[in-house]
Image (cartoon, rainbow, N blue to C red):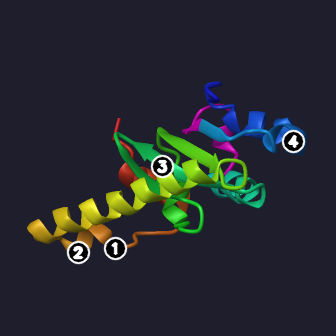
Amino acid sequence: QIDVEGFDGDVMLGAGDSVLKRVEYLEFEYNWMGSWENQHLYDMIDMLDQKDFTCYWAGNEKLWRITGCWMQYFDVHLWSNVACVNRSRVPRLAYKMEDVFQKTLKATDVELDKEEVDESLHEILSTDAAKMSLHYLPKK
């Protein structure tokens, strides 16, 4: 687990192949602090994918896959946890995490079926992270 108050990306970049190839599970925070101000989550997810990691947004007993499911607004710098599993080193854990993701999707589909969905909540306002953060972050 990496928790270095905004410098998580720096740790991953500095770890290099020799360290990351031995890592089975990796969890880090993504936010607007420290180096994250100028780094993009997409770049970290892409680097980790190339090293056989699959990454997910981590919630309470829920996972939402980021790897292979990238959406531009994921780069809005909000406080969140990202959990990554090394597909080649621990395939059983990778399977379990993907299973949790699939169950999360099914549970979300059921919840959406039970309520009327306001489609305007899902329209893309912008692909510009700065504009989106103005829209989504709490007003001060």
Q: Is residue 43 above or below residue 18?
A: below
Residue at label 4?
A: 16
Disc 1 crowd rating (10 Å Cα; few below 14, some 14-19, many 20+) is: few
Amino acid on which disc 3 is placed: Trp
Which of 6/100 is in front?
A: 100
Identify which residue is drawn at 35% across, 35% down.
Answer: 140
State if disc 1 and disc 4 touch (CB < 8 Å): no
Residue at label 1?
A: 123
Which of 90/118 is in front?
A: 90
In magenta, the rendered stretch is: 28-40
Residue at label 2?
A: 119
| N-terminal label among 2 and 4 | 4
Q: Using residue 134 as the reference point, say whether residue 77 is left or right of it.
A: right
Q: Residue furthest front?
A: 92
Q: Which numbered circle lies on residue 57?
A: 3
State if disc 1 and disc 2 touch (CB < 8 Å): yes
Q: Using residue 106 as the reference point, say whether residue 73 is left or right of it.
A: right
For label 1, the SS is loop
Q: Is residue 47 above or below residue 20?
A: below
- The Cα–Cα distance between marks 2 and 3, rounded to whole angstroms, is 23 Å
Which of 10/64 is in front?
A: 64
Q: Is residue 102 visible?
A: yes
- Nearer the observer, disc 4 or disc 1? 4
Amino acid on which disc 4 is placed: Gly
- The Cα–Cα distance between marks 2 and 1, rounded to whole angstroms, is 7 Å
Image spot of residue 57 (x, y percent): 48, 49
Q: Using residue 139 as the reference point, say whether residue 79 is left or right of it.
A: right
Image spot of residue 131 (x, y percent): 48, 59
- The Cα–Cα distance between marks 3 and 4, rounded to whole angstroms, is 23 Å
Amino acid on which disc 2 is placed: Glu
